[in-house]
Image: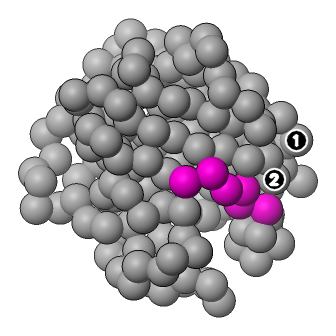
Amino acid sequence: MPTNHTYKIRDLSCQEKTQLKQEISSIDDKFWIKHFKIPHRLLSLRDGETIHINWPADNIFQQMPERPELVPEILDLINNIIPPNQLGRAYIHRLKPGDCIEKHSDQIHVKNLNIQDRYHIYFDIPESSVLYVDDSVIENKKQFENSIVNFALSRMHYYKNYSDQNWYFLVFDKINQ
């Protein structure tokens, strides 16, 4: 059962942080796509772009193109946290300046996608951004920056990039066997 509160598992090592950020920055713009093929007014993830690493088909969302070959270091990190046979969705999301992810919870995914845990890594959180998790604004955003975070799916969350730089984060799910 997914956690009811978001908490940091551990910080990335300096080497991990450097490798992962270099890998993300080396991805050609042509590979970044909208998170979902069909925009829907009820979907909170309308802004930003995504590299889908793993995207199992389900009864809610359509299959998306997977590009794990673009991010071997990230995939290695994920596979050191989650056994490959328990990896559900995994993607890198990019919020450009002015982009936001509307306030929502992912409670529906717990049952439909059989999620045991969801993890986030927020890379270099811009100072002039909003990080809203567990139903509240996180004032000390640095506590979650460049860290592996066990994320509370059932709680409301929201992100807004007010900065002049892109903001990247990695999301990956551990599914029940």
Of the pair 150 and 135, the residue shown nearer to us:
135
In the rendered structure, are the residues bearing label 2 and label 1 in contact, judged by CB atoms less than 8 Å apart? Answer: yes
Residues in magenta, as a range: 102-107
Percent across and percent down for residue 87 are: 60, 59
Of the pair 16 and 42, the residue shown nearer to us:
42
Residue 83's place in the image compared with 123, above or below, is below
Q: Amino acid at mark 2?
A: Ser
Q: Residues within 10 Å of mark 1 (few under 14, many from 20)?
A: few
The residue pinned by badge 2 equals 154
Q: Tell me which colouring the rendered structure shows.
A: one colour
Q: Which mark is residue 172?
A: none
Q: Secondary structure at mark 2?
A: loop
| Magenta stretch holds residue 143 | no
Residue 35: image quadrant is bottom left
Residue shown at 16%/47% (left/top)? 27
Residue 6: image quadrant is top right
Residue shown at 56%/17% (left/top)? 141
The residue pinned by badge 1 equals 4
On the question of residue 61 being in view, the answer is yes
State how far apart marks 2 and 1 are (Cα).
7 Å
